[in-house]
Amino acid sequence: MIALLVCDDSAMARKQLIRALPPEWPVNITQASQGEEAMAAIRQGLGEVVLLDLTMPVMDGYQVLAKVREEGHSCRILVVSGDVQEEARRRVVELGALGFIRKPAPAEELRATLDELGLLRAEPATTETQPADKPEIKVGFRDALREVTNVAMGRAAALLAEELGVFVRLPIPTVDLFEASELHMALADANRGDSLSAVCQGFIGEAIAGEALLLFHDSEVADIAHLIGVRPGDDTATSEMLLDLASILIGACLTGIAEQLDIRFSQGHPQLLGEHARSIDELIQFNRARWRQTLAVEISYGLEGHAVHFDLLLLFTESSVPRLTAKIQYLME
């Protein structure tokens, strides 16, 4: 039997990945929800083969790869991640990963990659080496939506990285249900007293509706403009730049979510909202009547080597939750 370690902070991702494993592959499966747990399992000999996510709390996948090399473990690691930036692929291979598969990993691609890398030992089943039963994994709605968003934001980050010529640091998305008056809590870390500019874009499809809100700190806009080549002081070009960046991030993220849930979103035109607003609360008040109680998904992108980040909120209406739940439940079956 092969000691297989599946490391991902999302129960949804672990369930999808384990379900995609070749059914005849004789493995003993151990699960880890973050890098330190993975390293503990590897030190116990439970990670002969490791399927490793990159974006995790406590210790991420890059740190796991570096630690495995530092400690001299012989485990063979295949990265399975939603971060599909070319630089991410290059870095994991440089750190010792044997290969890279983007989430969600199709069963056929996973089998072919394992076989190509020599990791798939499809030994004849005997009483000693029977294919292991796949563990039953319970997945909650928030975890599932967070993982769907994680995959979508990775695709958006790849486009942003290509546009700006930088490496985009990806966060772990947060999912919460808020009253309109509480939305500022979702951005408490981002609200540093800076003035803000924001782009808002509505979306609707198959009984799911909401608005995407992308926030920029004005103190960082000049750095973004410099990356793109916009001249300082050109307010018109700066506004167009913010709208273009919003189209990339919001459009790619919504498309990624829609593809996974097998729906199609119609998107409104992006609008510059509350330019140079004094606080997040001022922005929330602008649309308070429409947002009311909202399912909020927060994503905070950062640019490596630059003091720049974007805060993206996907705000789903309360009436969208039943349809979202049904779509996600179907995805998990």
Image (cartoon, grey):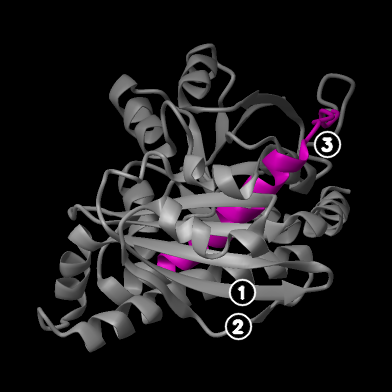
Measuring from the top left, give residue 190's x and y in whole percent: 35, 45
Which numbered dot is residue 124? 3
Label 3 crowding class (10 Å Cα cut-off): few <14, some 14-19, many 20+? few
Amino acid under disc 3: Pro
As drawn, 195 above or below 25:
below
Q: Residue 154: within the magenta?
A: yes
Determine whether, in the image, residue 251 is placed left or right of residue 304.
right
Q: Nearer the viewer, mark 3 or mark 1?
A: 1
Determine whether, in the image, residue 224 is placed left or right of residue 199.
left
Magenta range: 133-158
Amino acid under disc 1: Gly
Question: Disc 3 versus disc 2: distance between alpha carbons?
Answer: 56 Å
Amino acid under disc 2: Gly
Determine whether, in the image, residue 298 is placed left or right of residue 148.
left
For mark 2, give the secondary structure: loop
Label 1 crowding class (10 Å Cα cut-off): few <14, some 14-19, many 20+? many
Question: Disc 3 versus disc 1: distance between alpha carbons?
Answer: 55 Å
- The structure residue drawn at horizontal position 72% and vertical position 63%, both measured from the top left corner, is 260
- The structure residue drawn at horizontal position 85% and vertical position 27%, both measured from the top left corner, is 130
- The structure residue drawn at horizontal position 86% and vertical position 53%, both measured from the top left corner, is 322
Kindly tell me whether residue 178 is visible in this rendering: yes
Which numbered dot is residue 202? 1
